[in-house]
Image: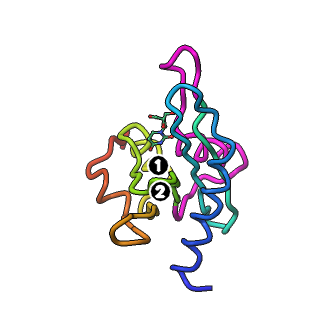
Amino acid sequence: MNKKEQYKQLLEFAEEASKNSYSPYSKFKVGAAVLCEDNKVFCGTNVENASYGLSICAERSAVFTAVSNGCKKIKAIAIYNKNGDISPCGACRQVIAEFAKDAYIIYNSKKSGLKIIKISKLLPNSFKMD
Ligand code: THU
């Protein structure tokens, strides 16, 4: 399987995860799938709360699941919403950058199909302690 096929498959995992979205307030279902260095995949979805600020995005949900399962190096993360063109929010970019020096962000663009962008392009100069 080449890289593009692998990313398409990752986006399918993200689509599947979006079906578990708990988003009764926004009605905006998002799924994310993280591809780890050892090729394991971990998924997440957005989980909202009646106290709005406690809600978590699909991307952070997926990254925290990956880390909780022993993966600290991310190769790619795919993000799915049925309307496409969903690129991660600022908070999620910072969280992704923590575990991914050169990871690729994958999502579906209505205009141009599969979009593949490096996290360093989406978040140049991410905050680091060193
Ligand atoms: N959301 C995500 O899960 N990922 C994003 O990249 C943007 C927004 C969620 C948060 C909230 O549950 C809903 O989408 C609407 O903002």
Look at the numbered discs 2 and 1 and tell me whether their residues touch, using CB distance below 8 Å. yes
Q: Residue furthest left?
A: 125
Q: Specify whether residue 70 is painted magenta.
A: yes
Q: Quadrant of residue 109?
A: bottom left
- Residue 94 picture location, percent across and down: 40, 42
Residue at the spot 56% in from the left edge and 57% down from the top edge: 73
Q: Is residue 124 left or right of residue 14?
A: left
Residue at the spot 54% in from the left edge and 26% down from the top edge: 55
Residue at the spot 37% in from the left edge and 39% down from the top edge: 129
- Residue 50 picture location, percent across and down: 57, 16
Residue at the spot 47% in from the left edge and 49% down from the top edge: 96
Q: Is residue 90 above or below residue 76?
A: above
- Residue type for callout 1: Ile
Q: Specify whether residue 63 is painted magenta.
A: yes
Residue marked by disc 1 = 96
Q: Is residue 38 above or below residue 62?
A: below
Query: Which stretch appears magenta?
Result: 48-76
- Residue type for callout 2: Ala
Circle 1: element type? helix
Q: How many marks?
A: 2
Residue marked by disc 2 = 100
Q: Residue furthest right?
A: 69
- Residue 119 picture location, percent across and down: 38, 57
Q: Quadrant of residue 38?
A: bottom right
Quarter of the picture holding the C terminus: top left
